[in-house]
Image (cartoon, rainbow, N blue to C red):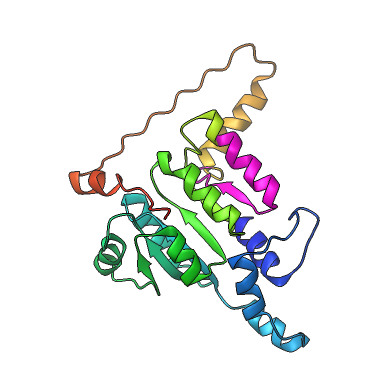
Amino acid sequence: IFMQYVRERGDGHDDGTMGKKVAGHAGTARERVYNDDSHTTRKVRTMQPLRALLVGAGGMGRTWAKNLVSNSDVQLAGWVDIRPGAAAQAAHELTIHADYYGDSLAAALSAVAPDFVVDVTIPEAHHDVTLTCLNAGIPVIGEKPMAVSMEQAHAMVAAAERTGVRYMVSQSRRYDARLWAYRQLIQQVGTIGILDADFYIGAHLDRKSTRLNSSHANIS
């Protein structure tokens, strides 16, 4: 859904759910890529990979990097982490390539002009990363949890509504067959008075992964 939104936004299509268009780096990128009014040229350029900027080079950041480069619809245009050299080091260890590495989100937005941003920073940084990108007109898909407080979460939603730029939280278990089976079981039970669901996860992180997950994003 998120990728479809970004693609249609770049094409200038509006199905009524996109909101107003906002000037910024995303708009500049679209003008540069889609500056030919001929139908043929637009059709060819529409199929160009979407430029992704990955923020965060921790354990989950590395997982997202592998997912992004394995998708033929996406180009890993940039990767940043607050720790100088961390993104480039992660790419080297994963034997993948990004066109840009850095430790400043603001500088990366200017240099990369991404079509969208993937926020894989720690929860404490989600608010600032998201607002920085939305205010620049760049759609964001972020990791769970959304924020560290309801106040920050409300501010992030308000920024998306104000700018008309989409912000989504990754729900990686949405299509988990076990959850769908659980849902069907609940429907079969009938009227339920009390439903209690407990979720347990053993995050088997080694010391290196734990250290990498402590990275923030440098907004300046």
In this rendering, does residue 75 appear at all?
Answer: no
- In the image as oriented, which residue stretches furthest toward the top? 193
Residue 154 magenta: yes
Above or below, 173 relative to 63? above
Q: Which residues are magenta?
A: 153-173
21 or 95: nearer the eye? 21
Residue 14 sits in quarter: bottom right
Question: Residue at horizontal 51%, vertical 37%?
Answer: 178
154 or 210: nearer the eye? 154
Residue 27 at what x, y percent from top left?
65, 68
Residue 120 at what x, y percent from top left?
42, 50
Residue 131 at what x, y percent from top left?
55, 48
Residue 183 sits in quarter: top right
**Which image quarter is the C terminus in?**
bottom left
Question: Residue at horizontal 67%, vertical 69%?
Answer: 10
Residue 167 at what x, y percent from top left?
60, 49
In this rendering, does residue 126 appear at all?
Answer: yes
- In the image as oriented, which residue stretches furthest toward the front? 220
**Which image quarter is the N terminus in?**
bottom right
